[in-house]
Image (cartoon, rainbow, N blue to C red):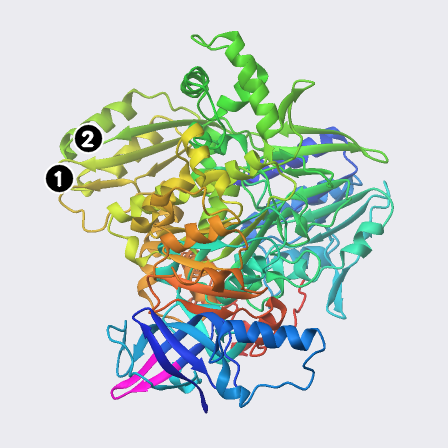
């Protein structure tokens, strides 16, 4: 690779490189300078003009050209006098090992663009989750980037991004990568019904979908499951932090549970009285059931308007879902026709069950043989937002964010707003796959909580285009710039090495 | 005795059909417990079915997971060929689609079709390629018979059972006659007519009998219809009374437990009843074999119990606790043991891993548990065991 620049000044964390004329250094570029022991990997975080001519003179010359008074005026030896300067930081020292640099690279060292060979130390980890290829500026280097699934999923992943930057595409690529392995259980709460592939390509088109994918919807496709949860599957603790209840209402719920056991919700909806519960409180609880869960009584029968909750069907739905997750399957739950509270409640029921079982496994010494389970949840401030937690209290998602790591249960949290998530939760989300974000407070919240020092990357993050990202994780040596492939293209590459299924012979 | 009671239950059910003057009968699989059952049982069943047929009542059947054989002729095939009943499973795969054929009942013009059950839920493959459009657009009163549990409808107690989503069923049928699930269920789901599982007529294992003892009434559904289903009514067909009692040995040594159990059974009123005794817990001293279960059974039979079944799978003792697995019955104990140990076995074949592997192993154990029939030669028994084992493992084609 040819030289593209030279180190001319700077300090640690702010190395100044003069760009060679004709070469184009981009924001986010990965550059390399060789030292005696190996290479220093640099990343460009700012670009500005440099000139040997004073500003006053440049302004005059420009004014003369613009006003037509010096049309033939040109700079003498322009490539020497005017140039681009790049501000970089050293992100990695590559030799036999990869280390965080603690010295400045050689002064006046020549700099070139990174090549594939320089990055071959990035190997495929165990339990890999594919993210994309390394990006240097806008150029793609043919080196694939993976996360170690066991580490990343159990230590939580945050995907912060504004709309239209490709976060759904990223999640689909990750799930596609996991689908073929059957080593991780992933629960996907899908409020836009965009992961399975009801119309168009989706996870259902993966060659291993038949074995490793489950889809639940109120409007199921042939071969997929109806999303129906029996009311007896709902415990009072599932409502915690999801459906706000006053102290009196919580107390009433406990009394109903004690009196009616699994049938506590049905009893409330039917208006059956319990000693110690004020009839007005009962009326409010009925209203809450109607508003939050769409459950009410009609002609003496319990009806659920969104068809998700039932008193007759769905007794083993939650058990089946948890079993699928424990068997390393991806379970997508189409919540597109549900209100927020119903969606979060369903997630809460399943997540509580998973956490409960995995806590048991840990105490029995069986946790090591269990697959990690992760929960994909969108618009995460609904459950992890500081205001929300202050108003309604902790919920199973915040508990998972704080403690789930101990039990191999994690979150993949997707959000546009990072600044509303409490710092203690943000710092627990140990892998951040940062996509483009034009909001300065959000970028700063991310930068402040990242695993690497991204204090100089504000501009980098702001300039991330669709499908571009930076992975900052406690499990990566440096904040890796990425280009995420289109899901459809990645899916095709997964489908190439697949044996055709043998024909089914019908025996009546 | 159990076999006799099971036969009685079947005969009683057909008597109910005669009494109700039904037009036809649908059997959703497992008419028999195996594809080549005891000929004495077959003889009695055939006599009853012939009586029903002679009265002009047609019988429509599908195979179940027990009475089906993919490579051997089963008793259901023989009886169907003899005209005793009509199998309503017929179809062919064309352009990767399974097209089933309707059978029309001549008396009522009801249209019947179904998919049989297979071991390990292998019939799910047929649903994947089923030509639903063809079935759904057929006009008239339609009945779909199937022998599979449904994910959305199975009770929590059967959560571990192999099942499939209800979306696999073709929509728009007036009645869905379900089999395989040993529990009575009447359910409704949007887009489907009445879905009914009548449960077992008597019982196949301790759990079935226990359900009966706890109040579950075996029987059948009588469905009245014209253009649509007008009424669905369950008719009980009990064949005996039950008595169930439980005894917990916790904090007792084997001597005390034995004394108390003997006293308990001696005081019980069991005449004419089928008795189920569940003994569970951990003995504080002594061995489980110190409890004389043979004596207990003899006492019960002597007092007039028509049958006595003692379940001790959840019984253990402190002194011999090297293997501790609790379970309500053989099936549950086997499943738990396999689940605990399957992870230690390295295999590449997906069917041998995880839940698939466990189901397969349990089914194989069930097959290997079959006794040699009294009229069976040893050589024939060995061949039958080999054949049924290979069928269970779905290896028959590979071995040919």
Asked if one can make out residue A311 in the rendered structure from this viewpoint, the answer is no
Q: Left or right: where does residue B197 sit relative to residue A268? A: right
Q: Quadrant of residue B190?
A: top right
The front one of B322 and A351 is A351
The percent coordinates of residue A70 (x first, y second) are 67, 81
The percent coordinates of residue A422 (x first, y second) are 39, 41
**B4 lies above or below B43:** above
Around disc 2, counting alpha carbons within 10 Å, would you say few (fewer than 14), some (14 to 19), or many (20 or more)? many
The percent coordinates of residue A505 (x first, y second) are 66, 69
Return the residue at label 1: B286
- Region of the chain picked out in magenta, as a range: A32-40
Residue at 49% in and 70% down: A482
Looking at the image, the residue that sits furthest to the front is: A69
Residue A37 colored in magenta in the image: yes
Q: Quadrant of residue B129?
A: bottom right
Q: Quadrant of the N terminus of chain A?
A: bottom left
Please tell me the numbered disc located at residue B257.
Answer: 2
Return the disc, 1 or 2, that comes first in the chain's sequence.
2
From the image, give the main secondary structure of the stretch colored magenta: strand
């Amino acid at each position: 690779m040819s030289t593209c620049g030279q180190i001319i000044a700077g300090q640690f964390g702010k190395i100044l490189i003069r760009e060679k004329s004709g070469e184009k250094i981009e924001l986010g570029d990965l550059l390399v300078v060789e030292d005696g022991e190996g290479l220093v990997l640099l990343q460009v975080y700012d670009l500005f003009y440099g000139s040997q001519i004073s500003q006053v003179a440049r302004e005059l010359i420009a004014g003369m050209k613009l006003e037509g008074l010096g049309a033939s005026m040109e700079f003498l030896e322009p490539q020497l006098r005017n140039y681009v300067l790049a501000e970089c930081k050293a992100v990695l020292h590559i030799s036999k090992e990869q280390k965080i640099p603690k010295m400045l690279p050689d002064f006046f060292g020549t700099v070139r663009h990174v090549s594939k060979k320089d990055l071959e130390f990035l190997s495929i980890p165990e339990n890999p989750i594919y993210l994309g290829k390394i990006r240097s500026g806008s150029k793609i280097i043919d080196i694939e980037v993976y996360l170690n699934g066991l580490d990343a999923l159990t230590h939580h992943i945050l995907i912060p991004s504004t709309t239209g930057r490709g976060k759904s595409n990223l999640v689909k690529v990750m799930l596609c990568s996991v689908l073929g392995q059957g080593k991780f259980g992933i629960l996907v709460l899908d409020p836009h019904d965009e992961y399975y592939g009801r119309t168009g390509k989706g996870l259902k088109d993966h060659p291993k979908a038949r074995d490793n994918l489950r889809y639940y919807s109120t409007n199921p496709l042939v071969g997929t499951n109806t999303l129906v949860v029996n009311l007896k599957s709902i415990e009072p603790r599932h409502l915690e932090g999801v459906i706000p209840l006053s102290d009196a209402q919580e107390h009433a719920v406990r009394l109903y549970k004690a009196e009616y056991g699994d049938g506590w919700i049905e009893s409330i909806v039917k208006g059956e009285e319990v000693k110690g519960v004020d009839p007005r409180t009962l009326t409010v609880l009925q209203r809450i059931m109607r508003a939050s869960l769409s459950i009410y009584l009609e002609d003496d029968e319990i009806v659920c308007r969104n068809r998700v909750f039932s008193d007759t069907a769905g007794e083993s739905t939650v058990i089946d879902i948890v079993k699928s997750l424990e068997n390393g399957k991806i379970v997508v739950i189409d919540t597109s026709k549900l209100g927020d509270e119903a969606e979060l409640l369903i997630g809460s029921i399943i997540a509580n069950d998973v956490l409960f079982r995995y806590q048991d496994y840990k105490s029995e010494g069986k946790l090591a043989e269990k697959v990690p389970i992760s929960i994909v949840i969108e618009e995460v401030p609904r459950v992890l937002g500081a205001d929300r937690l202050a108003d309604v209290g902790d919920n199973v998602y915040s508990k998972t964010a704080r403690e789930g790591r101990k039990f191999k249960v994690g979150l993949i949290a997707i959000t546009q707003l990072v600044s509303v998530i409490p710092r203690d939760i943000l710092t627990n989300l140990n892998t951040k796959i940062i996509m483009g974000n034009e909001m300065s407070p959000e970028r700063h919240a991310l930068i402040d909580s990242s695993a690497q020092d991204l204090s100089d990357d504000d501009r980098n993050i702001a300039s991330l285009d669709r499908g571009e990202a930076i992975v900052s994780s406690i499990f990566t040596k440096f904040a890796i710039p990425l280009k995420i492939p289109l899901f459809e293209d990645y899916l095709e590459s997964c489908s190439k090495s697949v044996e055709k299924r043998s024909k089914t012979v019908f025996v009546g | 005795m159990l076999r006799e009671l099971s036969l009685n239950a079947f005969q009683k059910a057909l008597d109910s059909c005669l009494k109700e003057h039904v037009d036809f009968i649908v059997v959703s699989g497992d008419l028999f417990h195996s594809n080549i059952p005891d000929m004495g049982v077959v003889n009695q069943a055939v006599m009853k079915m012939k009586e029903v047929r002679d009265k002009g009542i047609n019988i429509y059947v599908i195979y179940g997971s027990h009475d089906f054989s993919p490579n051997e002729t089963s008793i259901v095939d023989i009886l169907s060929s003899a005209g005793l009943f009509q199998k309503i499973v017929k179809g062919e795969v064309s352009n990767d689609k399974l097209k089933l054929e309707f059978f029309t009942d001549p008396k009522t013009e009801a249209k019947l079709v179904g998919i049989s059950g297979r071991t390990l839920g292998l019939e799910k493959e047929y649903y994947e390629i089923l030509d639903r459009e063809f079935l759904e657009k057929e006009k008239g009163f339609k009945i779909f018979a199937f022998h599979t549990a449904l994910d959305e409808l199975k009770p929590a107690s059967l959560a571990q059972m192999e099942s499939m989503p209800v979306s696999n069923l073709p929509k728009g049928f007036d009645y869905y006659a379900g089999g395989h699930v040993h529990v009575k269920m009447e359910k409704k789901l949007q887009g489907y007519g009445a879905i009914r599982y009548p449960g077992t007529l008597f019982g196949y294992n301790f759990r079935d009998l226990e359900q009966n003892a706890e109040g579950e009434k075996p029987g059948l559904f009588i469905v009245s219809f014209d253009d649509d289903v007008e009424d669905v009514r369950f008719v009980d067909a009990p064949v005996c009374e039950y008595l169930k009692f439980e005894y917990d040995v916790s904090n007792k040594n084997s001597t005390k437990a034995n004394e108390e159990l003997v006293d308990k059974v001696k005081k019980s009123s069991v005449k004419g009843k089928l008795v189920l005794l569940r003994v569970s817990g951990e003995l504080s001293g002594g061995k489980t074999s110190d409890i004389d279960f043979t004596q207990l059974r003899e006492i019960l039979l002597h007092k007039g119990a028509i049958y006595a079944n003692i379940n001790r799978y959840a019984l253990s003792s402190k002194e011999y606790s090297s293997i501790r697995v609790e379970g309500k019955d053989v099936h549950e104990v086997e499943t738990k043991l396999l689940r605990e140990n399957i992870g230690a076995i390295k295999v590449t074949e997906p069917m041998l891993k995880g839940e698939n592997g466990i189901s397969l192993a349990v089914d194989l154990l069930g097959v290997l548990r079959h006794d040699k029939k009294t009229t069976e030669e040893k050589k024939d028994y060995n061949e039958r065991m080999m054949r049924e084992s290979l069928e269970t493992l779905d290896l028959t084609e590979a071995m040919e």
